[in-house]
Image (cartoon, rainbow, N blue to C red):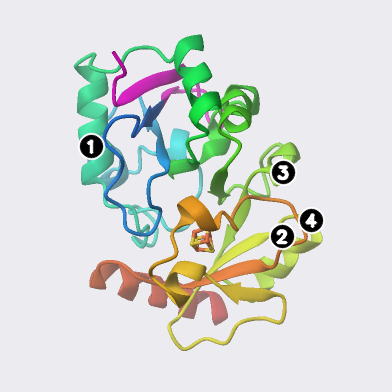
Amino acid sequence: MLQNGYVVWEGSSLIDGSPIVLILTGFVNPTSNRKTGRQLQSWILSQNYVPTYAAKHGLDNSICGNCPLKLSKTGSCYVNLLTPNNIYRSYIAGNYPKFSEKELALLQHYRYPLRIGSYGDPTAVPLEVWEAIILASGKHTGYTHRYQNCDLRWQEYLMASVETEADAKQAQNQGWRTFRIITPDAPLSDNEILCRHTEDDRIQCETCLLCNGKSSKPNIADKVHGLNWKVSNFLKYLESKSN
Ligand code: SF4
């Protein structure tokens, strides 16, 4: 019987070598995320720590690297950690079977769209692990904050996640398409368009798929959103970068 979630891979983080896991969910119960729509969600989690504990104590290096948005840095990461917490607990309880050729064939048949990295940086997991599911899905979106440190073959599939125009330019010069978070009143750069969902909330990533890595499509910017305290931390962070 088809399960909602599967363990795709367990191994050493490419960031720091500690044990991490890649879990895919949404096969039976699609996510309620109004922005992404019915994309399969993928979770890169430490095997050793509950996500909230790891985030609070800066023990999330294995999955987030040096991302400036982490709770232990600027505290502006938009991910609500309650979901990764629940997934981690289900994983520890042994509720997720191993992803097998059977599920891969299903993915290939139904072409479920995939969100690469609902939590955690995808590049912590070897590209070869991902490629099987990315190619089977055929439709994906994804982002990395590790665009300066990761395997550049990732440019094919991921957007470089940036916060300033200068960082966007630098990443673009290195061959990345970028996804930039901006303040609500900030202008777009010449080569950017606003996230389609922000423009019209009937559009979802599931069908939009603009954030799918290297192509001649424009770069994307989106207005900062989420919990007030996270938005406020993000604005402080941007201000510190401009000084
Ligand atoms: S531009 Fe499209 S794919 Fe990218 S985040 Fe917005 S809705 Fe999703």
**54 in the magenta segment:** no
Q: Position of residue 219 (x, y in %)?
A: 66, 67
Q: Position of residue 213 (x, y in %)?
A: 67, 50
Considering only vertical position in the picture, is 69 above or below 106? below
SS class of the residue under badge 1? helix
Dot 2: within a 10 Å radius of its alpha carbon, few (fewer than 14), some, or many (20 or more) residues? some
Is 167 in front, or is 160? 160
Read off the residue under disc 4: 174
Q: Earlier in the sequence, mark 4 or mark 3?
A: 3
Q: Alpha carbon of mark 4 to alpha carbon of mark 3: how far?
A: 13 Å
Read off the residue under disc 2: 171
Q: Earlier in the sequence, mark 1 or mark 2?
A: 1
Q: Residue at x 56, y 43 (%)?
A: 140
Read off the residue under disc 1: 85
Considering only vertical position in the picture, is 4 above or below 238? above
Dot 4: within a 10 Å radius of its alpha carbon, few (fewer than 14), some, or many (20 or more) residues? few
Q: Position of residue 71 (x, y in %)?
A: 33, 54
Q: Alpha carbon of mark 1 to alpha carbon of mark 3: how far?
A: 30 Å
Q: Position of residue 165 (x, y in %)?
A: 64, 75
Q: Is residue 100 visible?
A: no
* Disc 2 and disc 4 in contact, CB within 8 angstroms: yes
Q: Earlier in the sequence, mark 4 or mark 1?
A: 1
Q: Residue at x 51, y 69 (%)?
A: 196
Comparing marks 4 and 3, which lies closer to the viewer?
3
Read off the residue under disc 3: 156
The image quadrant of residue 150 is top right
Residue type at mark 4 is Gln
